[in-house]
Image (tube, coloured by chain):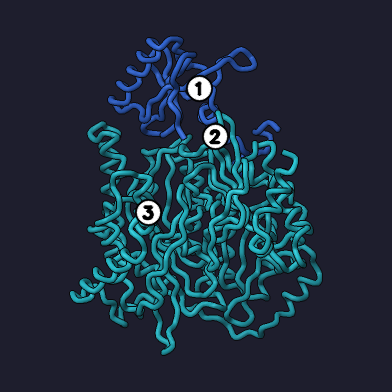
Amino acid sequence: MKKEAKGAGPKVLTANALDSGLVVFRTADGRWSTDIAEAAVAWTKGEADALLALGEADAARNLVVDVYLVAMTEGENGRLVPVLLREAIRAARRPTIVMPGEDPSVIAA
Amino acid sequence: MYRYDEFDRQFVAERVEEFRDQVARRLSGELTEDEFRPLRLMNGVYLQLHAYMLRIAIPYGTLNGRKLRRLAHIARRYDRGFGHFTTRQNLQFNWIRLEDVPDILAELAEVEMHAIQTSGNCIRNVSADHFAGAAADEVADPRVYAEILRQWSSLHPEFTFLPRKFKIAVVASPADRAAIQVHDIGLQVKRNEAGELGFAVWVGGGLGRTPMIGRKVRDFLPEAELLSYCEAILRVYNLHGRRDNKYKARLKILVHEAGVDEIARDIEAEYEAIRARGALAMPQEEIARIRAYFAPPAFAQLPARSSVFEAAKADSRSFALFAERNVAPHKVPGYGIVTISLKAIGAPPGDATAEQMELVADLAERYSFDEVRVSHEQNLVLPHVRLDDIPAVHAALAEANLATPNAGLVTDIIACPGLDYCALANARSIPVAQRIARRFADIERQKQIGDLKIKISGCINACGHHHVGHIGILGVDRKGEEFYQITLGGSGDETCSIGEIVGKGFSSEEVVDAVETIIETYLGLRQGPEETFLAVFRRVGEAPFREALYADA
C-alpha cells in the first residue's frame, strides 16, 4: 500500500494522470512526465512542501490525481532511485514479471 | 444463459451514457475526484498501481463465445492484449484509460455485459459453482438463483449505500465448489424430505484481514422465499452494520460482535415482516421463466464410455495426464467437464491473452454448446464437451499453452495481482507463484503430491483467498522488504476451515524452499498416496510442519 515519504532525504512528486491513469512525475518546468529521470528533486523539507503544493494545485486543475511525495535514495549507478519497491515498480511503469504475450527477454533474468 | 430483455438493454445503454457524461464532467473538472470516485467505483473503475483498472462483471462466471471474443477485442484495442480472471469470476484489465471507459462500456453493452457493481459498497457479482448445469452431484442449476439474485440486487435502491461490499455465492451440491462459507451470504440449493427445492443459508463469512467462516442461520429456506429472506439479511446489515470503521464494516463483524443468535432473530423478524407484505415472494411461473434461460442444451444420447477418448489416453501420455486431472465427470453419459488451466508453468496465474480468449471462444462454440465458465480458482471451464471431442479440444488447447494438466495440483495456484499491479499490495504474489510452479514443474512430482491448493495474497485484503488455501501465503512488508507468512490447513470447500499461521515468516529468497519443506514433510507423514495434504494436516496438526521449518532456528 501507499506510504507517503516523510523525513529527510531527496524526494520526487508523483501522481496518476487523470485521463490515462498513467504514473507521472512532476518536472522542474511544471510538466508531468512518465519518466522518473525527469522528475524535479526536492532536497529539503521546504522544497518538498513547495513541490507538493504545486502538485496539489495541478490536481485541483484536474491534470492529475492522487499526488504524493516519493522518497528517493542513491542507486547503484549514482542516480536517484525510489527507496520503496512499490515506487520502483510504479516508476518502471510495468510489473516485474513478463506479461502474457511479451517476449521473455523484456525482463532481465 | 440469461439474455437481456428490452428493459435490460435500455437500462445498460442509459447507464453507459450516464457514465460517459460523468467521465466528461470529471475530465473537464466539473466533478472533483471526491465526487467522482464513488461513481466510477460503482462502474468498476479503480485507480491502480500503473493505470486505471476496469473490473468487468461476469455473472456467476458464465460466458459465451461472443462475449469472450468481445473481451479479447477490448484487451487488444484498449489494453495490452490480455486480461486477468479473478477469484470472483470476473475479468480485470490493468491498463485502462479513463477517457476510453465509456467506449469500452458501450462495446460491452453490445454483447450484454457491463461493469456495474463490481466495486463499491453494494452487492457484488453473485458467484456460483463453475460446474453448474453439468455436475453429476447437483440438485438444480445454481445459476437460476444467482440470476434471480443478480436482478434483485442490481441497482436495488435500498442497498446502494451499504456499510461495505457484500458478496453472495450459490452452489447446488453437497460439494462446495464456490467457497460459500466465506461469503456474506452463502446458499446451498437442496431438497427437503418432500423433494421440494430450497436453500441452506449461511451468513457472515468472509476473508480479508479478519477471516471468518459463515454461520448457518437456516437449514431449509423454501425456494420461493429466497428474495424475502435475502432482503431481510441485507436490511439487518444495512441498519446495524458499522459505518464508523471501514475495517469493521462487513457483515461478518456484525455477526461476530452481536452473536449469530441475535442476528438470526433479527433476520427472522425482518423476514416475517417482508413476507407479510408479500412483495418478494417468487411465483413458480417467475422462477420457471428464469430457469428456462438455463435449460440444459440438447445433449446427444451417447454411451457412457467413449472409445475415442480411451484410445487417446492410451496413445498419448500428455492426453492421459490431461484427462486425469482436467476432465471431471458430467451428469450426462458421454460428456465431460473440461478445465482449461490458466496456470501454465511460469505464467501469471489467471491471465489470458486475447488470442487465447478467442481460441476458447471458438472451442466453446464448436464443442461446448457455446458455453464457457470462469472459476473462482482463476481457470476456465468448458462445461459440456463430448468425451469423443476432448482429444481434439486438448490438441487445440495445447497449441495455445492452455492444456497444462494441473487442475487442483500444486502448480494450480491462485494468486492475486499483488504488488506488480495493485495499489493496495505490500508484496508481490505473481513471482512467488511462478517460482513455486517452476520448482514443482515435473508433472510426475505433482501427481505424487496430489490434491494441493496453494493460494497467495499480496496483502491482508486476501484477494488471493490465502486463508482458505491448504497452503496459504500472505505477502507483507517487513521494514521495506517483501516477507511472506505461511498458513496451513485452510479450505474453501464444504469442510471450510481458516488456515493457521505456521510460525515466523519467510523472505522472498526463503519462501519457495519453505513451501517445498512443507510438502516434503507431508509426503513423509502421509499414510498412503490417497491421503491428501489437507487430510494429513487435519490428522497431525501444525507441529510436524513447524518443526521441519524451524528446527534449526
Q: Amino acid at mark 3?
A: Ile
Q: What chain is colored blue?
A: A
Instruction: Check the residue under mark 3 and report the chain it is in.
Output: B
Residue ID at (44%, 68%): B170
Q: Is residue B495 left or right of residue B515?
A: left
Which quarter of the rendered picture does the N terminus of chain B lie within?
bottom left
**Which residue is nearer to you in this view: B2 or B452?**
B452
Name the residue beneath numbered marker 2: B477
Q: Amino acid at mark 1?
A: Asp
The answer, for residue B352, to whether it is visible in the render is no
Q: Residues within 10 Å of mark 2 (few under 14, many from 20)?
A: some
Which quarter of the rendered picture does the C terminus of chain B lie within?
top right
Q: Residues at badges 2 and 1 in contact (C-beta under 8 Å)? A: no
| Image position of B545 with respect to B272: above or below | above
Q: In which image quadrant can residue B322 be found?
A: bottom right
Q: What chain is colored cyan?
A: B
Residue B91 drawn at (x, y percent): 48, 52
Q: Secondary structure at mark 3?
A: helix
Give the Cα distance between marks 2 and 3. Answer: 26 Å
Which mark is nearer the camera, 3 or 1? 3
Residue ID at (39%, 71%): B145
Q: In which image quadrant can residue B445 be found?
A: bottom right
User: Can you tell which mark lies on residue B253?
Assistant: 3
Q: Secondary structure at mark 2?
A: strand
